Amino acid sequence: SRSYCVTAHFAFQENEIKLLTAEIERLKNFGCLGVSPSLEGLRDENAKLKYRLNFLKKSLQEERSKSVKSMVNINSCLQEIFGAAIQAAYPDLENPPLVVTPSQQPKFGDYQCNSAMGISQILLKTREQKVIPREIAEKIVKNIPTNECIEKVEIAGPGFINVHLRKDFVSKQLSSLLINGVQPPAIGKRKKVVVDFSSPNIAKEMHVGHLRSTIIGESMCRLFEFAGYDVLRLNHLGDWGTQFGMLIAHLQDKFPDYLTVSPPIGDLQAFYKESKRRFDTEEEFKKRAYQCVVLLQSKNPDFLKAWNLICDVSRREFQKIYSCLDVTIIERGESFYHEMMKDIVKEFEDKGFVQVDDGRKVVFVPGFPVPLTIMKSDGGYTYDTSDLAALKHRLFEEKGDILIYVVDSGQSVHFQTVFAAGQMVGWYDPKVTRVAHAAFGVVLGEDKKKFKTRSGDTVRLIDLLEEGLKRAMDKLKDKERDKVVLTPEELKAAQTSVAFGCIKYADLSHNRLNDYVFSFDKMLDDRGNTAAYLLYAFTRIRAIARLANIDEQMLRKAAREEVLVLDHEKEWKLGKCILRFPEILQKILEDLLLHTLCDYLYELATTFTEFYDSCYCVEKDRQTGQIVKVNMWRLLLCEATAAVMAKGFDILGIKPVQRM
């Protein structure tokens, strides 16, 4: 469901529907009498009226059913309007191209419809009709239905349709934003979204490789939640498998009274390395480790307790990271699916998809050269089995409509194969259920190689976050924020906001499909497209009304009473930029590329700076500095900008502060 931009006057629309219905009946009768010299022309007119009627009926129904508070997506509005115009102009054309984009320059209007060129190509290929795009554009323009958002259209160049928005429409949408707050675009039916992200391994510390999955996954969840979806956040922990045999065997040796006295495992990473060294070098220990795995998988209570103790140590360490990054996630590791795996194997066997290869049970999926191994020759299960079990559970038990796996690009072939196997066995139809691998590249050091410590070890995530806090405080002290500007509490809040905000934003502002270079110097720079710049910009915007002695209550009153004047070109540019927020979110819901939101927030901040430099919000006496005039409609534009930025920060998981 989209927010449609047709006239809000229901009575006017209903009256037009009645008139159109009567006109269609008149034309029918006229044609039957045989009076018309051009029956084909009459049919065209009839078809146009029918499309116009259907458009109005649909628009009216949507206008009434959509939430009053949802923000209008102007791009979707225009797509709906031009879609109706194209259908009326070319009723026999199937799936005509519909291209509506914001204009890059003011001289080309506010938006452009560039469908005429595509339609020209289709007519040439399918009907061998050579029609110049400009003629097509003229025909589309003639069929634009009545609406409340377009002021005028112009045809430019070979067939571009430049769209100029009505100022009263933009002003009304900004007032709605100020009164109702920043609301999501209308999404239609509420769907269940399952997001699999973070997913570290038990007994191993979270490292920089987990940073991207955790940050991207959290932000995706926030976006879908804001849009009104029912979101389930899952942490697919590596908490089961043969490695637990060696960990439990080592626990028994090092802390023999572990059943009665909680073992003081301080450094689980060192504990893991010790057990791995013994597993690789001591044959007797290795045999005992395998026995421990068997006893664990048979649910022996003592071994389950040992397993839980090890998992708990890891959970506490993981939670420190999640608390720093303000991440909420539900643990559902591989162990959760263990009991389901034998049924998965049986289902694939019963449907004739299993082949035996050197004792292993494998499944070949058409189009993929490497098969899935669903059972090892020793009867054990694999990652393939657990991922298939997780997929089925999320589809059938959780009833997910959208499943998103935020996992690195190295796993792309694996997930494509698992998803294709799920389709092959009949679990879901990709036309109905969306199952997506939101892949991402690796984090690089400033030497453009995989990010590691000087000694060549993987960078621990907790060390990275602590370094971020230290550098953020150094930056604030360099600017002498600790001396006069901020109280100790405000300084601490600013440090946390800048440190974690900059780390998140540096990741999210890059296209997730690409690798990116991790650089504290770049991410803490308060110039350019960084969180530091945006956070400083946000606090400055929030301070404008405060310094003019305008409180929230006065702003709320003004939002209801003031008309937002958009006469100055910079006011107009800022107003339109603010209202692009819903279409930005809609795009990300479709392609899951969060850097688009970062680019938009940076554009919004720079557009605001242009506005603020050109338009006085608060006018002061040059000699005394006393406030002589407050231009309230401009303060409301400041407030709308800050409100959208705050919601954008919230989706990105960044916490702004009032003072910096």
Image (cartoon, rainbow, N blue to C red):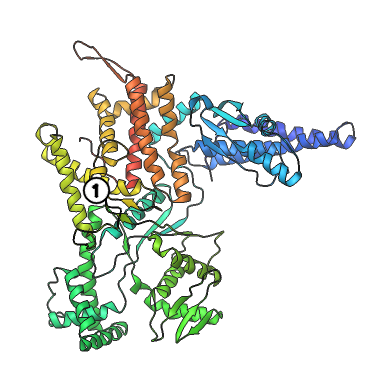
Q: Amino acid at mark 1?
A: Phe
Q: Residue at x 38, y 36 (%)?
A: 181
Residue 60 vertical placement versus 325 (above, below): above
Farthest-out residue, front: 447
Residue 194 is situated, as x and y percent measured from the top left of the image, at 42, 60
Residue 507 vertical placement versus 91 (above, below): below
Please identify the quarter of the rendering in which residue 414 is found: bottom left
Residue 35 is situated, as x and y percent measured from the top left of the image, at 89, 31
Farthest-out residue, top: 623
Residue 633 as seen in the image, left or right of residue 47: left
Q: Residue at x 72, y 36 (%)?
A: 131
Residue 10 as seen in the image, left or right of residue 396: right
Work out whether residue 644 can be spotted.
no
Residue 157 as seen in the image, left or right of residue 362: right
Please identify the quarter of the rendering in which residue 551 is found: top left
Q: Residue at x 54, y 29 (%)?
A: 149
Q: Quadrant of the C terminus?
A: top left
Q: Residue at x 52, y 27 (%)?
A: 109
Helix or strand or loop: what does disc 1 sit on?
helix
What is the crowding at mark 1: few (fewer than 14 residues within 10 Å), some, or many (at least 20)? many
Work out whether residue 560 can be spotted.
yes
Query: Which of 328 and 210 lies nearest the eye of the viewer?
Result: 210
Residue 61 is situated, as x and y percent measured from the top left of the image, at 59, 41
Which residue is labeled 1 in the image?
500
Number of on-image labels: 1
Residue 518 is situated, as x and y percent measured from the top left of the image, at 28, 50
Residue 530 vertical placement versus 264 (above, below): above
Query: Which of 178 and 627 lies nearest the eye of the viewer?
Result: 627
Farthest-out residue, left: 483
Query: Which of 114 and 74 lies nearest the eye of the viewer?
Result: 114
